[in-house]
């Protein structure tokens, strides 16, 4: 159905009353709407409690403008290999646009009814230095927020809203990050405390004592919604939804059960009732997911893109890549960490392969390739470091790093320009351009200390350099074929 006809159809509408809001979510993108929001809605329904979510868009007004005319209700469409299932998600009660009205966001976060502030602001939204995990006090948004009452960064919002709660004699909200970062709760706690110490040491002490920042591992593949997805949904349902989300059947959520104690049983939805794993230590699950899934996702994204593959499903349908990804799991990733108790990593890897191969999920290599400077450390470099320490070969991962270097150089192997999206894109391109030979380019990029520490850079330089050279001379497929 053509786009202009789709918009003539009746809009999706809410059935029943809006739930009472108890959560504010910063960064209401497709991922959280297809994952956390769905779990929370199910948990609220299972226990007969109200856990409405106020979404916040930090930058753009698009999500609010799309969803406001349909009362913030949207469709989550599950794309299985054999068909689709649609679900109407009604847990979002409002969307605030931070850029337009910072005061409304702070007031919502400081409201006594709010128990949790959750976040999916992507890796770069933490304004930290990925190599050290510390707050980047030179980040323009952080510098701005240290001086102003109208924040721009997620960290600024959290600290200022917590300050308001403390001043009002309220307990803090639980801060629940749902981004793909290692020990994400601990990392965020450190960043919030770094900021709070810079503005008010007493506030920092209060957050340190009373604040709670559970770690979480989140998993569901949610490619960006495309215009043709909106059209197909409208044709199937006869209703217009301006912002549906498309997701795979699989989902997993592991949450450290550490919420603000003052709220007792009301501190969180009954997540366990809907299959969320509440545990005391998320770290082994995070390691597994970041290394096994995200590490191979990024590897396939750079190498697949350079080999001319548009999506992950297309990439793993290429037998050379299928062998390569299994090689990465078996020889380079699985030996690098302890599996969580009771998890069979071989079965986990096979399940991942099936998920990648799902032809209904059109997840672009270009989309996953975004923000590599923020993703590489926890997805690939930690594994490389552990392999080096154990004297294990990491040729495949070094080849993935080399592919990333070619990618951020901005020109593909056929000489066509690449639309590189990364907060460090300009400086990465300049580093790449500063070298004349592949060896110089690799050395220049490895000197970027926001991504690589010196010991690791020195240890992998020769491998990455030879992989870079081989990729440019032989092309991606022959190199991978030779390796496996
Ligand atoms: C992907 C992730 O875009 C990316 O970088 O690797 O979003 C991935 O799809 C999710 O983490 C799956 O849970």
Image (tube, rainbow, N blue to C red):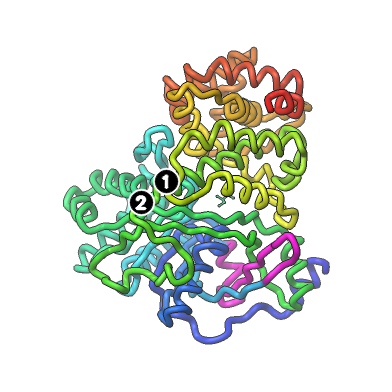
Examine the structure image and report whether residue 326 is included in the region drawn in magenta.
no
Return the residue found at the far right.
1
Where is mark 2, residue-wise? 281
Q: Which residues are magenta?
A: 62-85
Residue drawn where x is 79% and y is 69% of the image = 4
Secondary structure found at label 1: helix
Relative placement, left or right, of 176 versus 411 is left
Where is mark 1, residue-wise? 284
- Asked if the residues shown at circle 2 and circle 1 are in contact, with their CB atoms under 8 angstroms apart, the answer is yes
Relative to 409, is 113 above or below?
A: below
Examine the structure image and report whether residue 70 is included in the region drawn in magenta.
yes
Residue drawn where x is 42% and y is 20% of the image = 455
Relative to 307, is 200 above or below?
A: below
Residue drawn where x is 18% and y is 48% of the image = 201
> Residue 409, can we see it?
no
Q: For the image shown, how many numbered marks are present on the structure?
A: 2
The circle drawn on residue 449 is none
Q: Position of residue 421 (x, y in %)?
A: 60, 40
């Amino acid at each position: 159905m053509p786009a202009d006809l789709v918009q003539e159809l009746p809009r999706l509408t809410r059935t029943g009353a809006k739930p009472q809001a108890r959560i504010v979510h910063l960064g209401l993108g497709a991922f959280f709407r297809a994952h956390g929001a769905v779990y929370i809605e199910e948990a609220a329904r299972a226990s007969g409690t109200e856990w409405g979510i106020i979404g916040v868009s930090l930058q753009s007004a698009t999500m609010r403008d799309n969803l406001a005319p349909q009362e913030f209700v949207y469709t989550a469409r599950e794309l299985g290999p054999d068909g689709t299932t649609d679900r109407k998600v009604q847990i979002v009660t409002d969307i605030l646009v931070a850029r337009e009205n910072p005061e409304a966001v702070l007031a919502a976060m400081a409201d006594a009814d709010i128990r949790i502030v959750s976040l999916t602001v992507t890796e770069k939204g933490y304004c930290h230095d990925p190599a050290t995990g510390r707050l980047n006090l030179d980040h323009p948004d952080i510098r701005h927020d240290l001086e102003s009452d109208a924040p721009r960064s997620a960290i600024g919002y959290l600290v200022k809203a917590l300050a308001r709660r403390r001043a009002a004699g309220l307990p803090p909200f639980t801060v629940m990050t749902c981004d793909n970062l290692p020990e994400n709760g601990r990392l965020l706690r450190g960043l919030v405390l770094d900021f709070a110490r810079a503005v008010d040491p007493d506030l920092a002490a209060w957050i340190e004592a009373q604040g709670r920042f559970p770690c979480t591992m989140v998993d569901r593949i949610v490619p960006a919604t495309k215009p043709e997805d909106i059209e197909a949904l409208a044709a199937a349902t006869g209703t217009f939804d301006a912002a549906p989300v498309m997701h795979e059947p699989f989902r997993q959520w592991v949450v450290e059960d550490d919420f603000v104690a003052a709220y007792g049983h009301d501190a969180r939805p009954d997540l366990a009732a809907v299959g969320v794993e509440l545990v005391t230590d998320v770290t082994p699950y995070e390691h597994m997911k970041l290394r096994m899934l995200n590490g191979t996702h990024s590897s396939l994204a750079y190498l697949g893109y350079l080999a001319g593959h548009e999506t992950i499903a297309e990439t793993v349908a290429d037998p050379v890549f299928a062998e390569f990804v299994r090689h990465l799991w078996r020889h380079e990733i699985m030996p690098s960490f302890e599996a969580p108790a009771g998890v069979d990593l071989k079965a986990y890897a096979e399940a991942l392969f099936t998920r990648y191969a799902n032809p209904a999920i059109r997840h672009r290599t270009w989309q996953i390739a975004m923000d590599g400077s923020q993703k590489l450390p926890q997805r690939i470099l930690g594994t490389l470091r552990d392999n080096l320490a154990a004297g294990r070969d990491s040729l495949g991962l070094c080849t993935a790093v080399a592919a990333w270097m070619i990618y951020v150089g901005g020109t593909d192997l056929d000489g066509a320009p690449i639309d590189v999206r990364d907060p460090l894109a300009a400086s990465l391109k300049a580093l790449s351009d500063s070298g004349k030979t592949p060896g110089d380019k690799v050395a220049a990029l490895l000197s970027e200390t926001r991504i690589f520490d010196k010991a690791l850079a020195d240890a992998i330089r020769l491998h990455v350099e030879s992989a870079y050279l081989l990729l440019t001379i032989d092309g991606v497929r022959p190199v991978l074929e030779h390796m496996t």
